[in-house]
């Protein structure tokens, strides 16, 4: 079994501005950044991704699993934290012997929305939260049951209004915030997207994955939506599950992982 070195590092001064490294004992491992879900609520933390992070590191990936402020901190704290955490991980990777020229981004649920938003930062207007025309690009972005169409999620009242709380209002109340934060309203960076969604998911509707897939297709992005029969919303968090193994295989192919 691969030996894993674990480190916690802060990317900012705040209580939730940190991440955990899971580093395999091999130089030049490719980078995988994990963004946890939880409908943007403060009761959820990066520890829900720990089993997946360990499994990915044992498979040979260097994993940076990030924490961030959630909706109790108000707009735009969540977005600012995720942008800072991703940039920190990419820049810090070399210090840990990680090959950040091969990198992927994975987000589950709310983390899927944030992962897709990260890949639109280059196209945000100057002054928008997270805007960076030089933001890193990724070889593969994996969105697992993503809440990636925030306007639709608000309309459907997903998560008992969690998106409205995150954004500080409904789309008609704060349209400028949705224009800067809703991945389905933003121009995506090139790069392959893989969307995974269980057909037994009652927490995030399949329409979310279909919406972001259609948006990506409209922008000429290479995207595939795979529907997992019988999978619920949390199946991806089990590293032994079929969907987790499917994600691992996709990461290995995209990052040319050699065993």
Image (tube, rainbow, N blue to C red):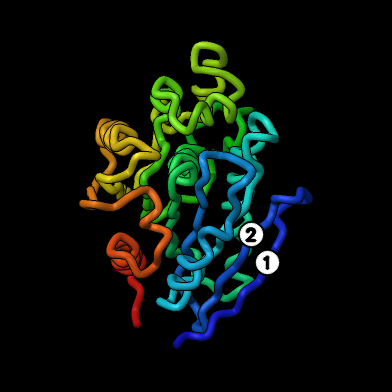
User: Where in the figure is residue 38, as x and y percent of width and height?
Assistant: 52, 45
Extreme-top residue of the structure: 172
Q: Does residue 169 appear left or right of residue 185 in this picture?
A: right
Q: Does residue 83 appear left or right of residue 191 in this picture?
A: right
Query: Residue at image x 64%, y 43%?
Result: 42
- Is 223 rendered above or below residue 33? above
User: Where in the figure is residue 7, as x and y percent of width and height?
Assistant: 66, 71
Q: Residues within 10 Å of mark 2 (few under 14, many from 20)?
A: many
Query: Residue at image x 59%, y 38%?
Result: 79
Query: Residue at image x 39%, y 37%?
Result: 188
**Residue 11 occupies quadrant:** bottom right
- Is 194 rendered above or below residue 131? below
Query: Residue at image x 32%, y 65%?
Result: 241
- Is 231 rendered above or below residue 156? below
Under tag 2, what secondary structure?
strand
- Which image quadrant: the C terminus? bottom left
Q: Does residue 213 appear left or right of residue 146 in this picture?
A: left
Question: Which residue lies under the disc numbered 2?
Answer: 19
Residue 201 visible: yes
- Which image quadrant: the N terminus? bottom left
Query: For residue 25, which numbered disc appears in the image?
Result: none
Q: First in sequence: mark 1 or mark 2?
A: 1
Labelled pair 1, 2 in contact (Cβ < 8 Å): yes
Q: CA–CA distance between discs 1 and 2?
A: 6 Å
Number of callouts in the render? 2
Question: Which residue lies under the disc numbered 1?
Answer: 8
| Front-most of residues 34 and 203 | 203
Q: Does residue 82 appear left or right of residue 147 in this picture?
A: right
């Amino acid at each position: 079994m691969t030996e894993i070195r674990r480190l916690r590092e802060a990317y900012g001064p705040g209580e939730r501005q940190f991440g955990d490294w899971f580093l395999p004992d091999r130089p030049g491992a490719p980078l995988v950044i994990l963004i946890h879900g939880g409908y943007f609520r403060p009761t959820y933390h990066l520890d829900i991704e720990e089993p997946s992070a360990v499994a990915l590191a044992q498979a040979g990936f260097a994993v940076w699993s990030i924490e961030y402020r959630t909706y109790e901190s108000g707009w735009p704290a969540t977005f600012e934290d995720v942008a800072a955490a991703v940039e920190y991980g990419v820049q810090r990777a070399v210090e840990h012997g990680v090959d950040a020229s091969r990198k992927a981004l994975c987000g589950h649920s709310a983390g899927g929305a944030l992962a897709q938003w990260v890949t639109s930062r280059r196209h945000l207007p100057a002054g928008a939260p997270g805007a960076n025309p030089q933001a890193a690009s990724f070889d593969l972005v994996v969105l697992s049951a993503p809440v990636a169409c925030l306007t639709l999620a608000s309309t459907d009242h997903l998560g008992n209004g969690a998106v409205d709380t995150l954004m500080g209002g409904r789309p008609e109340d704060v349209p400028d915030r949705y224009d800067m934060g809703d991945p389905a309203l933003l121009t995506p960076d090139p790069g392959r997207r893989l969307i995974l969604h269980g057909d037994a998911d009652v927490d995030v509707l399949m329409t979310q994955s279909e919406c972001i897939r259609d948006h990506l297709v409209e922008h000429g992005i290479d995207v595939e939506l795979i529907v997992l029969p019988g999978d619920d919303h949390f199946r991806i968090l089990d590293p032994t599950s079929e969907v987790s193994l499917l994600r691992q295989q996709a990461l290995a192919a995209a990052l040319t992982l050699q065993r």
